[in-house]
């Protein structure tokens, strides 16, 4: 007599395993420990076999009968339900493994490791390049099956937009992913390496406009002093040539990183990752002390006009330069670094390694090890004070180049 829901519900464990039969080989097996399993007894190629159909009550009587019918249909088609289930599980495992080895999966694994050392803004740009230009076209492809022609097609689509720099970056970053895949045993070749000559040449690097002639630099400094906009932006314009940091580092500067008593600014340099220490000249300390009275209660030195929880816009300094009618091809916020580097080398004869430290460029010792953030700090303090005094002299109109040559 077929089972009913009530019989299944009332089935109690006994000292020995009990089998409650339903129909067509389906039965409910109740173990002494209290487990309830649905089983199917069937014959295939002359042999009696059994197949598990689930656990009661998770699988009720109706579901168990449906599974029984599915298994019976397979037998009728000459397919062993047990082998069919094993094949399905193997296929699912293979599919899951394949999903781990797609270009997108491997790229994200590589990115997760690299993002620990990349500057956050740079990391966002790299991920955006993958998500916009690569993943939509080869993201689901097994990385081991991607060959040079397929990758070239994707890169040529980027190139057709007229963004050659982005095209080459896509080739370089995809190449890093393939190298990572090779090391992890997920690929055997790096097709990106085969495409070096297959793309239009990378455009020549354009340097930021900068004033590197002392007299013209003095004129620029006087122009900056004439800015009549907000006090915070005026301070940023006066600090930029004195500190020679990257514009993004200056506008995102936080009061917590400054020690005006020690005349030091410690922060994570945007490109070099390790902590960086900037010695502050007396002129910079004076500017910062005045600024602290205005914005010192907040997080940022230069808060956004819309919200004190964000730094000012990256266009604030550029807009101020344009408001002063300084041409775009003449000076930029980043150009002050080049002014310091060039004049410091050619006129003031600063040591190159000290200037590289100040610019947060990686400098290594004779053994190839990078110096720490406090390397040559006394020398750098003297250098930056001398640079600030020099800026004051040429801003006042003195022929500082001649003065420095006589001093030398």
Image (tube, helix red, strand yellow):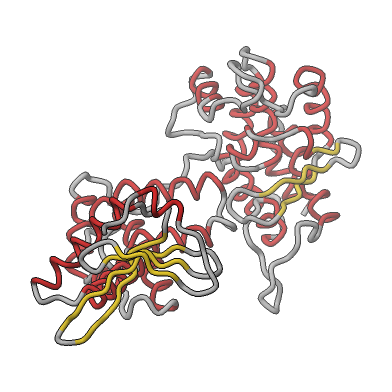
| Horizontal and vertical percent position of residue 373 | 76, 57
Q: Can the viewer see residue 192 in this picture?
A: no
Quadrant of the image occupied by residue 137? bottom left
Quadrant of the image occupied by residue 378? bottom right
| Horizontal and vertical percent position of residue 33 | 56, 68
Residue sitting at 67 percent across and 60 percent down?
A: 352
As drawn, 77 above or below 10: below
As drawn, 257 above or below 13: above
Q: Can the viewer see residue 180 in this picture?
A: yes
Quadrant containing the C terminus is: bottom right
In the displayed structure, does residue 251 sit left or right of residue 161?
right
- The extreme bottom residue here reads 46
| Horizontal and vertical percent position of residue 1 | 26, 59
Residue sitting at 16 percent across and 87 percent down?
A: 46
Residue sitting at 70 percent across and 28 percent down?
A: 300
- The extreme left residue here reads 77
In the displayed structure, does residue 331 sit left or right of residue 195?
right
| Horizontal and vertical percent position of residue 103 | 33, 63
């Amino acid at each position: 007599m077929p089972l009913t829901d009530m019989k299944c519900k009332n089935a109690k464990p006994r000292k020995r395993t009990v089998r409650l039969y339903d129909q067509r080989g389906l039965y409910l097996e109740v173990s002494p420990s209290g487990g309830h399993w649905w089983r199917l007894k069937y014959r295939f190629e002359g042999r009696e076999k059994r197949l598990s159909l689930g656990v009661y009550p998770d699988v009720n009587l109706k579901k168990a009968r449906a599974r029984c019918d599915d298994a019976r249909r397979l037998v009728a088609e000459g397919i062993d339900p047990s082998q069919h289930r094993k094949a399905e599980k193997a296929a699912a495992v293979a599919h899951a493994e394949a999903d781990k080895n797609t270009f997108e999966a491997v790229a994200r694994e590589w990115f997760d490791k690299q993002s620990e050392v990349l500057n956050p803004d740079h990391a966002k740009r790299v991920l955006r390049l993958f998500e916009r230009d690569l993943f939509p076209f080869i993201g689901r492809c097994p990385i081991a099956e991607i060959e040079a022609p397929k990758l070239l097609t994707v890169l040529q689509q980027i190139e057709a937009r007229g963004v050659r720099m982005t095209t080459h970056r896509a080739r370089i970053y995809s190449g890093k992913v393939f190298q990572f895949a090779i090391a992890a045993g997920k690929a055997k070749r790096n097709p990106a390496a085969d495409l070096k000559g297959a793309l239009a040449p990378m455009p020549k690097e354009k340097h930021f406009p900068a004033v590197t002639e002392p007299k013209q630099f003095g004129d620029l400094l006087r122009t900056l002093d004439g800015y009549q906009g907000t006090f915070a932006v005026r301070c940023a314009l006066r600090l930029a040539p004195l500190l020679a940091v990257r514009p993004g580092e200056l506008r995102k500067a936080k009061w917590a990183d400054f020690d005006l008593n020690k005349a030091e600014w410690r922060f994570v340099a945007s490109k070099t990752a390790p902590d960086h220490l900037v010695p502050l000249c007396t002129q910079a300390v004076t500017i910062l002390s005045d600024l602290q009275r205005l914005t010192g209660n907040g997080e940022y030195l230069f808060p956004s006009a819309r919200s004190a929880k964000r730094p000012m816009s990256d266009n604030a300094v550029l807009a101020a330069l344009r408001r002063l009618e300084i041409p775009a091809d003449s000076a930029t916020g980043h150009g002050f670094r080049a002014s310091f580097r060039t004049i410091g080398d050619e006129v003031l004869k600063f040591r190159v390694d000290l200037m590289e430290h100040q610019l947060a460029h990686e400098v290594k010792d004779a053994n190839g090890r990078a110096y720490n953030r406090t390397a040559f700090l006394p020398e750098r303090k003297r250098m930056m004070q001398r640079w600030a005094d020099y800026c004051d002299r040429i801003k006042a109109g003195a022929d500082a180049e001649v003065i420095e040559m006589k001093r030398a």
